[in-house]
Amino acid sequence: MNRIFCANMMRLKKYKLFWLGVILVAGYGIFNCCSIYRALQKYEEAYPLDNCLLTFMPVIGIVLSVVVSMYLGTDYSDGTIRNKIMAGRSRNSIYTANFLTCSVIGMATYCLGLLSVVLVGVPLLGGIQAEPFTVVKLFAVGLLLVLANAAIFNLIAMLVSNKAHSAVVSILLAFGLLFLAIYIFQMLSQPEMVEDWMMSAGDTEWTKRVVKNPRYVSGWKRKFYEFLIDFLPSGQGIQLASFAEAHAYRMAGCSVALIAVSHIAGSRIFHNKNIK
């Protein structure tokens, strides 16, 4: 497994799509910092750097879906995986080495993106105002989220032999999860009570009243939505983008569960997969 992983690292250093993904993530974070700075200059308001640090998290899953699927898909299209098996490498070592490679892709993208935002954001917006423990905690949650994305897209890339099909499935999944998370957030953000204007019969005056919002989600459905938004990688990304720490521990636990389930299930299915 060590030789496979080292060979992957050598190829990754020269893989242009990987570096393009890093640039896109870093550029997205820097763009948000600069946009906020221009707005602050116009309205002369204070805005802490904390709220800019992880704004790239919602898009990092999309970037990883492209990079991982294309990188691992090359192994199938070039026949590399078949050659490794014929050379005596175990399927478990191949799958694990590829997962570690995907993890390095995710961690490098995450860390370099974060570093870029800090280098640009500190001169523009000043230092971080949050407590050090809060910052470390959210950074760790973000790292686990990246590893969860790596495990999911590694599973897809290793089980779908066709490079193009693997890329399409991964990208559609990434966008689908993002749109689902946005929809759930919109449902949860509905206020319980809303203002309503009513005109009495035969009267020309409008009366304002407060009524229950029919779109407000309550009861077990709200609890399920709240769990789902913490469980989905895209939901975690949106929460981290706003530097929200309310459900940090639950999000971390969900990421660990996703990593374990994706890796165990993927390695077992890959063990029995017919590779032509």
Image: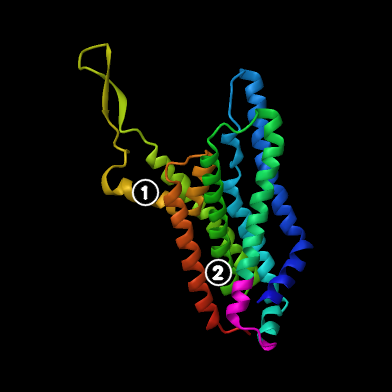
Which image quadrant: the N terminus? bottom right
Residue 53 among magenta residues? no
Tag 1 secondary structure: helix
View extreme (top): residue: 204
| Kind of residue at badge 1 | Tyr
Instruction: Confirm whether residue 105 shows in the render.
Output: yes
Q: What residue type is labelled 2?
A: Leu
**Residue 83 falls in image quadrant:** bottom right
Residue 18: image x %, image y %? Answer: 72, 58
Task: Identify the residue shown where x is 71% and y is 38%.
Answer: 119
Q: Provide residue 232's location: percent of width, then percent of height.
A: 46, 54
Callout 1: few (<14), some (14-19), or many (20+) C-alpha neighbours within 10 Å? some
Instruction: Report which residue position mark 2 lands on.
Output: 155
Establish if 19 lies above or below 123: below
Determine the image quadrant of residue 157.
Answer: bottom right
* Residue 62 placement: quadrant: bottom right
| Residue position marked by numbered label 1 in the rendering | 225
Locate residue 171, reporting x and y percent. 59, 58
Q: Spatial distance from mark 1 to mark 2, Cα to Cα? A: 26 Å
Q: Residues within 10 Å of mark 2 (few under 14, many from 20)?
A: many
Start and end of the magenta stretch?
Answer: 86-97
Which is nearer the N-term, disc 1 or disc 2? 2
